[in-house]
Amino acid sequence: MTHATPGDVPGSVGTVQPEAVVARLRSHGRALFWPCLVLVADAAALGYFGGTFAEPWQNWAVLAAAVLVAVLLFLLPLIAWLGRNYTITTRRIVLRSGIFVRTRQELLHSRGYDVTVRKAGLQGMFGSGDVLVNTGLERPVVLRDVPGANLVQATLHDLMELSVNPVATRRQQEQSRGADETTAYGRR
């Protein structure tokens, strides 16, 4: 017969649940509409004007201009869109951004925060929106234009409820005791 320790019993205080990824998000793909349209127009213009000039340098100039437009107006916005992502796990929110300089920010669910959804313009029609996570600092952290913004908000609320910080809970209980209670030699 073996004796169970507090860490062996599921749901006990000593149990540590492994962190699991709940969602990986990027901004809505609608952000790539104009860059894709520019790429199609650029390819059409190159197909129409490429090789039609008498001088070879003019044809090379058309090709160079088409490549420059494709890099500046399609490739850079695509890389910027791919460079920003949000990961929601059972314990925290991880925000990563940047192309050449990567920035990583983490928000623990156990700290508690306020979650607001803001929808503007076409966001309401596409079901996306900005999720503002107010941590009590100067400015809220913003998950920009995420698809399913209302579902993200509901998920964050559920994850906050599930991740109770035992130290914070104990402190709240200690602070909620009456002021007239005194402790003498470890007893009440």
Image (cartoon, rainbow, N blue to C red):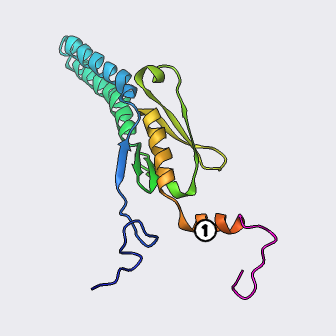
Q: Residue at x 37, y 21 (%)?
A: 34
Q: Residue at x 70, y 84 (%)?
A: 187
Q: Main secondary structure of the magenta part?
A: loop
Q: Nearer the viewer, residue 76 or 108?
A: 108
Residue numbers of the magenta segment:
176-188
Q: Position of residue 100 (x, y in %)?
A: 41, 48
Direction from residue 115 to residue 137 in the image, left or right: right
Res 126 → quadrant? top left
Image side of residue 136 versus residue 38, left or right: right
Q: Is residue 179 above or below residue 51?
A: below
Q: Please name the amino acid that badge 1 sits on.
A: Arg
Quadrant assignment for the N terminus: bottom left
Binning the other alpha carbons within 10 Å of mark 1 as few (below 14), some (14 to 19) or many (20 upward) gives few
Say which residue label 1 marks.
170
Drawn side of residue 72 relative to residue 175, left or right: left
Residue 94 coordinates in the image, percent (x, y):
44, 51
Residue 128 colored in magenta in the image: no
Q: Is residue 103 visible?
A: no
Q: Residue at x 37, y 72 (%)?
A: 9
Of the 4 image quadrants, the one containing the C terminus is bottom right
Q: Quadrant of residue 55?
A: top left
Residue at left 51%, top 54%? 109
Residue 79: give x, y in percent of width and height. 35, 38
